[in-house]
Image (cartoon, grey):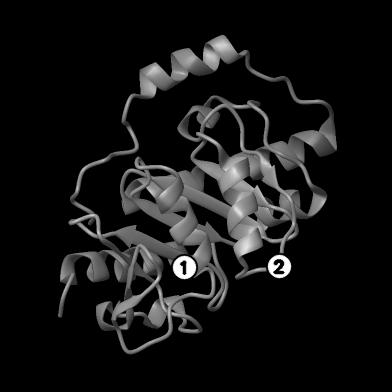
């Protein structure tokens, strides 16, 4: 089986995503750039995450051609490909429909710097304008909105996190769901305070590459 390492990592972190409660059923998807930088390993469409094995993971070229795999690639393939093309620092993409991220996405609320964990994600988590799932329009709007940040909410949909490794990207997704819950509940109670940009920059330096960029994925 070609790209066995990458396929095993995608299957492993797909199960982790399910265990963390970031997805329901077959919703959401994730991918990993292969070690040679030529292709991506991506979750299959319509397969429950607690059942995905390495052999179910599909290998697609960065141009969108099928390289290997018996299953159909995720319906959000164009979104993943567009993100890899847009930024060389992106090595993995995680897309979830986690509860509080989805709530904020439906409200059209971006996540401002209301907690120091925002430094894991950028200076905020913006909201990309709505577009139908699986379309190139959604891919384009996501790329233009995420900018240099590590996460973006998709209006009336969910969220996307990117990272220097698949472990890093999933950690960002988990952090963003935590921030979304804090922000939603804080907004319900009042007007949450925001951190200054200078403090966010200090936090970024303090965290460094805390999320992890190593190739070891398990």
Q: Quadrant of the C terminus?
A: bottom left
Q: Quadrant of the N terminus?
A: bottom left
Quarter occupied by residue 24? bottom right
Residue 146, horizontal then vertical, whole percent: 57, 41
Residue 187, horizontal then vertical, whole percent: 80, 35
Q: Secondary structure at mark 2?
A: loop
**What distance separates the C-alpha of mark 1 from that of mark 2?**
24 Å
The residue wearing badge 2 is: 132
Quarter occupied by residue 126? top right
Residue 174, horizontal then vertical, whole percent: 49, 49
Q: In percent of the image, x 65 and y 26: which residue is there?
A: 114
Mark 1 neighbour class, 10 Å CA radius: few under 14, some 14 to 19, many 20 or more: some
In depth, the one of 94 and 19 nearer the eye is 94
Q: Which mark is residue 18?
A: 1
Q: Is residue 6 above or below residue 45?
A: above
Lateral position of residue 43 relative to residue 152, left or right: left
């Amino acid at each position: 089986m070609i790209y066995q390492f990458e396929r095993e990592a995608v299957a492993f972190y797909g199960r982790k995503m399910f265990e963390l409660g970031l997805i329901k059923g077959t919703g959401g998807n994730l991918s990993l750039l292969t070690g040679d930088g030529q292709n991506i390993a991506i979750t299959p469409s319509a397969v429950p995450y607690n059942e995905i094995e390495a052999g179910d993971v599909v290998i697609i070229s960065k141009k969108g051609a099928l390289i290997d795999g018996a299953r159909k690639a995720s319906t959000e393939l164009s979104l993943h490909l567009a993100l890899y093309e847009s930024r060389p620092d992106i090595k993995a993409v995680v897309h979830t429909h986690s509860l509080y991220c989805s709530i904020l996405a439906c409200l059209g609320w971006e996540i401002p710097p209301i907690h120091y964990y925002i430094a894991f994600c950028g200076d905020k988590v913006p909201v990309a304008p709505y577009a139908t799932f699986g379309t190139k329009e959604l891919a384009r709007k996501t790329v233009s909105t995420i900018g240099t940040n590590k996460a973006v909410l998709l209006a009336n949909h969910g969220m996307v996190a990117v990272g220097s490794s698949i472990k890093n990207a999933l950690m960002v997704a988990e952090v963003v769901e935590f921030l979304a819950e804090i922000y939603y509940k804080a907004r319900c109670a009042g007007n949450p305070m925001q951190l200054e940009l200078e403090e966010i920059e200090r936090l970024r330096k303090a965290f460094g590459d805390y999320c992890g960029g190593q190739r070891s994925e398990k």
